[in-house]
Image: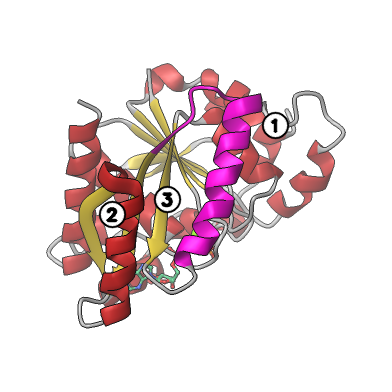
Amino acid sequence: MARILAVANQKGGVGKTTTSVNLAAGLAKAGKRVLLVDLDPQANATMGSGVDKRKLARTVYHVLLGLGEVTSIRVTAAAAGYDLVPANRELAGAEVELVDLPNREGRLRAALATVERDYDYILIDCPPSLSLLTVNALVAAEEVLIPMQCEYYALEGLSDLVGTIKRVRGNLNPRLEIAGLLRTMFDPRNTLAHQVSQQLEQHFGDKVYRTLVPRNVRLAEAPSYGAPAVTWDQASKGAQAYLALAEEVLRRAG
Ligand code: ATP
Ligand code: MG
């Protein structure tokens, strides 16, 4: 059975998608069978996996609305080494259309149950909001991986996310836990980054991943080559950090 991880933070641009595609590729490199679900209408995880969002007839939108099976909609992201349930702009409409459907928060969970046996890991790249899409991811997942930048307002935003996780745990998914907090785009020369990083460790202890992802331009360039940095430039500092994260995730799974 797959271990299902939602990569979530309602704050935009903190590294959710970069983490999703590179962790997926890192786990695949370690020999794991991985499915990545793109749950963001921006479809950055789709493009970053080397799949052209403009050429897709069916996507995660159809999965959520019950218009197609995961087994017929998933594609192989060959360059990246994992399977992908892709997204495109159409997903933006799902938010509204889901509201009147039965089991609106549990639709992704039900859909993923049909393929759980095919994978060791299923990662879900969430949009930058605490919307019904993100709630679907939190209901489907056992654990949440929270990427964050060590900035002044980072901790404040975290309390909203932790509140949402608690509510989902209370109402919809009692097994949900925080897998870990990942410090992204870390700049060791920045004093504030160190302070926020220390505060994080004080508040969350072992829940903070040891792995620090540095700011590294190769991670930002990789999407334009249609592959995660982990496969496209494995020697880069950014890729090495995500390979270390994959190891840490595997180690923590015990
Ligand atoms: P959104 O909330 O819009 O979905 P996100 O949280 O998924 O954003 P990313 O898209 O992963 O964040 O990253 C935001 C930008 O920062 C992207 O341009 C990405 O290439 C770049 N980026 C992410 N991580 C790093 C890093 N460690 N070093 C340098 N650039 C990075
Ligand atoms: Mg993103």
Q: Which residue is at 68% across, 57% downward?
A: 89
**3D distance between C-alphas at marks 3 and 1:** 20 Å
| Secondary structure beneath label 3 | strand
Q: How many marks?
A: 3
251 is higher (above) or lower (below) than 220: above
Asked whether the beta carbons under mark 3 and mark 2 sit within 8 Å of each other, the answer is no
- Location of residue 142 in the rendering, given as x and y in whole percent from the top left corner: 45, 28
Q: Amino acid at mark 3?
A: Ile
Q: Which residue is at 75% across, 45% downward?
A: 94
Residue on which the image places disc 3: 146
N-terminal-most mark, 3 or 1: 1
Which is nearer the eye, 45 or 186? Answer: 186
Which is nearer the eye, 85 or 193? Answer: 193
Query: In the drawing, what numbered circle is on residue 105?
Result: 1
Asked whether the beta carbons under mark 1 and mark 2 sit within 8 Å of each other, the answer is no
Q: Quadrant of ligand 1?
A: bottom left
| Secondary structure beneath label 1 | loop
Which is nearer the eye, 88 or 14? Answer: 14
- Location of residue 222 in the rendering, given as x and y in whole percent from the top left corner: 33, 68
Q: Main secondary structure of the magenta part?
A: helix
Which is nearer the eye, 57 or 140? Answer: 140
Residue on which the image places disc 2: 201
Q: Which residue is at 23% across, 49% downward?
A: 245
Specify start and end residues of the magenta stretch as a single range. 154-178
